[in-house]
Image (tube, helix red, strand yellow):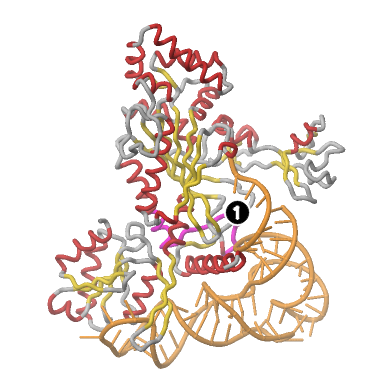
Amino acid sequence: MDKQETTAGNTATMEAIVSLCKRRGFIYQSSELYGGLNGFWDYGPLGCELKRNVRDSWWRTMVRCREDVEGLDATIIMHPDIWKASGHADGFADPMVDCKVCRRRFRADQLCEELGLALERTETGFALPEGVRCAHCGANALTEPRAFNLMFKTFVGPIEEERAATYLRPETAQAIFVQFKNILDTTRQSVPFGVAQMGKSFRNEINPRNFTFRSREFEQMELEYFIRPDEAVELLCGSVAELTPETDLSEPREDWGWEVWHKYWVEQRKIWYQDVGLPAESLVEYWQPRDELAHYARACVDIQYAFPFGVQELEGIAARGAFDLTQHQIHSGKSQEVFDEPLKLAAAKLDDAARDAFRERTVAAWTAQGRDPEAARAFVNHLFEGKYIPHVVEPSAGVDRLALALICNAYCEEKIVDDKGKEDTRTVMRFHPAIAPIKVAVLPLVRNKPELVACAREIFTGLQRRWNCFWDASGAIGRRYRRQDEAGTPFCVTVDFQTLEDGTVTVRDRDTMQQERLTPADLKERLTELIDG
RNA sequence: GCGGGCGUAGUUCAAUGGUAGAACUCCAGCCUUCCAAGCUGGCCACGUGGGUUCGAUUCCCAUCGCCCGCUCCA
């Protein structure tokens, strides 16, 4: 198959998936009634259940099942200085120009600077001085400079004035850093520990694409896991555990440095993706090469999924050092250091010679990285007092991206041949039961037998309290099964004439279309095993 | 953002310078003892705004949206 055929085939698949999403109520275009709004999507009845299941699973795994992670639910609108400290406001408010000839984009101020010129301010924005040309092709065909702030701006209070301006958050993570001290003070946690948050974020993406994959309003699930700087680990444990292929990552250990912690979270996250139904072979682990890393990142791994439109990122797991808390310490003027008693005790046990040696080693290491030796000395002196700004490992995932991956992964067209040899296509959403929007459909075999319907109804209301269930009594049973196949309902419970005699019902499996007959007593137990087991 | 393509029921498609048909879906009813069966009836569309024209879903322009390629993605 050549590349074009592949693309065409994948486009066809994606179109079929988008069509099913609308037809069955997973995802609709936002504001469709008014012609739609680029980069915004709504989740319908099935889609919102799917998303809820994804979020619940993440929260359960990351927060409730761990003693070392706390939850947070911060506001979407926060103090605008936060975005200055984080780098979002400055880094993305630069005026940009496009070359109409070679179609490259440049920062207007940088083009001017190279020519020793200055960007001119106008009443409405910026203007290029005479003589500025495209830095790539040299053409004199640049657009007017345009501000490219990818954050959504808004105003706090009813008056639209600059001093009231702020932004909708472009990521949920910053609130975790900003509330770090409060959480530390109110939870009895100590480093290492994490804070998790999920919620909406907003980015004015230049070019929303690929269905919901790149949207302007989207939902994130983020963890900031705070760890000791490696130097603190060394003081405490004598050495920092080296990351090797044999390193046991099943349980955290005290002597882990950032590299092992980082790898640990990559592994944890991969396990979870498989738990929600993405096969291991569909996941790609992409380690960003050094030159691709943001300046504050020490390492970053993308967990990617092979979408029909390409292999794309579901989650980024970054080791960010102490960058974020340091930024907030600088901008807020308030210390973000923690006090680590075991560290202080460990440091106190060292004699002066050992301390000096440690200090010299650290200064040498920092200097080798081009960092300030004075800062290194101050850092070490704080360490000896048990004080440091925690480092952080950040697994940051997109809920919508994962929901889309789960939908793509579940989508399946299957050829089946009936008893009469007639061929038919069955469209099935093979969701893992844990995240399937509807877990069980309850169906009376026929509708015109009141006692049969009544019996099914009773079973339905019984199961409804436990799982999201669906009632369907219309038309022929086959049609109802197929309807549930497209919704991705893993199990259908059918009440038939034998039920009236001995109380047993059938449970039909979505993927195999096989049925088993169970007594009412066994039904709930069996479904629990199938759905929650 | 640039270039190309496309917008007709929920979906997939037709037709037409004189305001649109079908299939499937969906809804109601009948029927139905396990995989989109059958019968009867029903709902539902020319993305939006201009222009040309006696008259535009059809031609033109703009806009919005979707898809593809490039670009971008802190």
Q: Is residue A51 magenta?
A: yes
Q: Is residue A200 visible?
A: no
Inspect this view and state whether residue A484 appears: yes
Q: Quadrant of the C terminus of chain A?
A: bottom left
**Residue in front for this viewpoint, A3 or A514:** A3
Q: Residues within 10 Å of mark 1 (few under 14, many from 20)?
A: some
Q: Where is residue A527 drawn, in percent x and y?
A: 23, 63
Judged left or right of residue B57, residue A399 is left
Give the percent coordinates (x, y) of residue A390: 43, 26
Image-quadrant location for residue A223: top left
Residue A83 placed where, x, y %? 57, 34
Q: Nearer the viewer, residue A46 or A317?
A: A317
Most distant residue in the left direction: A502
In the image, residue A200 above or below residue B16: above
Which residue: 63% across, 35% down?
A: A91
Of residue A511 and residue A178, the one placed in the foreground of this image is A511
Chain letter for mark 1: A
In this view, A27 is above or below A218:
below
Which residue sits at x=76%, y=42%? Answer: A145
Instruction: Say which of A260 and A17 sits in front.
Output: A260
Residue ID for mark 1: A208
Secondary element type, mark 1: loop
Image quadrant containing the N terminus of chain A: bottom right
Amino acid found under the numbered disc labelled 1 = Pro
Left or right: A347, with A310 as reference point? left
Which residue lies at the image location 29% right of the left edge and 66% below the top edge? A440
Q: Which residues are magenta?
A: A33-52
Q: Is residue A310 above or below residue A20?
A: above
Residue at (37% x, 49% y) in the render: A272
Pinpoint residue A211: horizontal percent, then vertical percent: 55, 59
Residue A166 lies within the magenta run: no
Q: Is residue B72 above or below residue A375?
A: below
